[in-house]
Amino acid sequence: MTMIEVQQMSTSERLRAMETLWDSLCHDSEELESPVWHGEILADRKRRIETGEASFLSIEEAKEKLLR
């Protein structure tokens, strides 16, 4: 599929195509390897939680912060 063909699709058609692609990628997860830095970030977040350095927001607080 070319970019021109994609641009000619309606928004709902493009969203459906994107969902189909995403769904197919999710089922092929064994083939996808997470980058090393993902593990490093997760380890750092776990360490911050365990040492009490992490802070958390409620869903309401997070939404409010994002809308500012």
Image (spheres, helix red, strand yellow):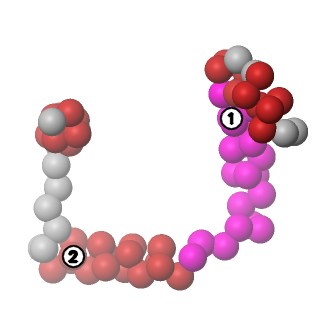
Q: Is residue 66 above or below residue 55?
A: above
Residue 61 % position (x, y)? 14, 40
Contact (Cβ within 8 Å) of mark 1 with mark 2: no
Q: Does 18 sit left or right of 66 as displayed?
A: right
Within 10 angstroms of label 2, few (less than 14), some, or many (20 or more) residues? Answer: few
Q: Which is nearer the N-term, disc 1 or disc 2? A: 1
Residue 43 % position (x, y)? 37, 79
Q: Amino acid at mark 2?
A: Arg
Q: Which mark is residue 19?
A: 1
Tell me the residue that label 2 is attached to.
48
Foreground pick, 41 / 2: 2
Q: Residue at x 83, y 30 (%)?
A: 5
Within 10 angstroms of label 1, few (less than 14), some, or many (20 or more) residues? Answer: few
Marks 1 and 2, how far apart in space? Answer: 35 Å
Q: Does 46 sit left or right of 8 as displayed?
A: left
Local secondary structure at mark 1 = helix
Residue sitting at the far right: 1
Q: Is residue 19 above or below residue 22?
A: above
| Main secondary structure along the magenta-highlighted residues | helix
Q: Which mark is residue 7?
A: none
Span colored in magenta: 15-35
Residue 59 % position (x, y)? 22, 39
Q: Is residue 32 above or below residue 10?
A: below
Residue 2 % position (x, y)? 84, 39
